[in-house]
Amino acid sequence: MTAVDFAVFVEELADAAGRTLLPFFRTSLGAEDKSRGGMFDPVTEADSAAEVAMRRMITQTFSSHGIIGEEFGNDRADAEYVWVLDPIDGTKSFISGIPTWGTLIGLLHNGVPIYGMMVQPFTREYFMGDGKAARWRGPGIDHAPIERKLKTRACASLAEVTLMTPSPLLYPPDELAAFRRVETAVRLSRYGYDCYAFAMLASGHVDCVMEAGVQAYDIAPLIPIIQGAGGIVTNWTGGSAAQGGNVVAAGDRRIHTAVLELLAG
Amino acid sequence: MTAVDFAVFVEELADAAGRTLLPFFRTSLGAEDKSRGGMFDPVTEADSAAEVAMRRMITQTFSSHGIIGEEFGNDRADAEYVWVLDPIDGTKSFISGIPTWGTLIGLLHNGVPIYGMMVQPFTREYFMGDGKAARWRGPGIDHAPIERKLKTRACASLAEVTLMTPSPLLYPPDELAAFRRVETAVRLSRYGYDCYAFAMLASGHVDCVMEAGVQAYDIAPLIPIIQGAGGIVTNWTGGSAAQGGNVVAAGDRRIHTAVLELLAG
């Protein structure tokens, strides 16, 4: 099986997730409506429903494959092929109505991410990669769908870097100190985006993205997109990011090297 | 002249701005491409071109009106009717490829904001209000445009608040200390959004938005949207926010009162 074989299938998964999620996005119901006593949490409902839909499609199509999902845990996680699913990456954006959350779908072969997609159903954007190449499909200037190759941009020094991280409030103290060493060295530090930050790195608009304490399903689907666009993504000591933990992605290898040095202290 | 008279005209302005801006969004050219030596800055180019287009339309249609714009300053700022234009609110999002910037268009009557629109051309979203009502038009689940009334949500106490601010890095020390007093009292604090945060407050997904040191064109166009949706927006001492400065918006008056008390120290 090659990446080409299941690229179409991954889009079908993404579209099934999108159809499930959009009705829950910007709903006035739920945990965010304090008058209802929190009986209905739209994020949990949406997350669960989308993962159920994707798990069913995977099981029906590839019965021997494993699945790692945010909501329903691991199923045959030691299979040759394992799917990694995060229906809503960026739940805080989702509940705040901000369209920078995404659905993440990844495929591991013997534990190595070989294909990944991030889809943003509201903006109708797909970011996908197989580690060798990456592409984007989304609305063009006339709003009709267009497709582009994704390529990270060159960046020679930290003083030229645009850095993104979801929020400094999410870092434990030691990691925050390490993050601050990087932040004070860059040109622009921006907060507030989850998977969308990695997508913009792959698109060549951001130079470095850092996160602390991520789960495998938060990052594994993004790795083939970032690498396919020419970027590099590892944990903070230079090892594989596929299992999650503290991760750093850079569009240019020189920036990655410089950041790892600062993180080492 | 009533708000109804020029609602159509404001949309024409917004669409002219969008047509001008979108070709510059996510371009690989310009200041963000370090290999070109900064000869071409897509944000400045886009900002200027969009404001020129809007100024020309206003001058041709309402020759006696004044204009306050981010790029080209004040023109008859003491006229009875004055337009307030910010072609790209959220330039840092714009240069990072994140679709949470917006074009702001406001109309003042004797200095009071009486109509405002925020448009996000990439997501095809329009947020508009006249101080009495507010509405949103954007893509529905099937991506065809739909329209909804905007309404802020009820929120009884700070402990239930979702708070947004563009970035704590933008606050001077005294303002940062005051902001931190609020931040530590709320349930969720989120960074990273400019006008989009106020739009989500008007939409009922966010309870409070704070900013320090904003210009009149950053906030005046948003005031009729926030107020039209049932929210309240003032400066940090409870006065008018129309001239900019430090601003705080809340969807529920109880939250606004509680925040002003904390800001007073």
Image (cartoon, coloured by chain):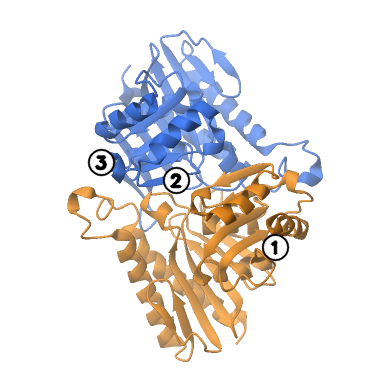
Chain colours: A blue, B orange
Q: Amino acid at mark 1?
A: Gly
Q: Earlier in the sequence, mark 2 or mark 3?
A: 3
Tag shown at residue A190: 2
Name the subunit of mark 1: B
**Looking at this view, is A133 or B93 the one in front?**
B93
How many residues crowd around disc 1 within 10 Å: few (fewer than 14), some, or many (20 or more)? many
Name the outermost residue toward the left: B36
Q: Quadrant of the C terminus of chain B?
A: bottom right
Query: Which residue shows up at 30% across the image and 40% down it?
Result: A158
Q: Which residue is mark 1?
A: B231
Residue A151 image offset from top left, x and y in percent: 27, 39
Which SS class for mark 2?
Answer: strand
Point out the frontmost of discs 2 and 1: 2
Discs 3/1, front: 3
Evaluate whether label 2 is on the same chain as label 3. yes
- Hey, what amino acid is under mark 2? Arg
Query: Please, which residue is most extreme toward the bottom here?
Result: B64
How far is disc 2 from disc 1 in space, using C-alphas? Answer: 28 Å
Could you say whether the residue bearing mark 1 is in a helix, strand or loop?
loop
Residue A155 disc label: 3
Q: Chain of mark 2?
A: A
Q: Position of residue A164 (x, y in %)?
A: 42, 41
Question: Residue at 42% of width from left, 45% of height from top?
Answer: A189
Give the residue type at disc 3.
Cys
Chain to which mark 3 belongs: A
Residues flagged by tags 2 and 1 on a common chain = no
Mark 2 Cα within 10 Å, few/some/many (few <14, many 20+)? many
Q: Is residue B15 above or below residue A243?
A: below
**Quadrant of the image containing the N terminus of chain B:** bottom right
Give percent across and percent down for residue A196.
Answer: 44, 40
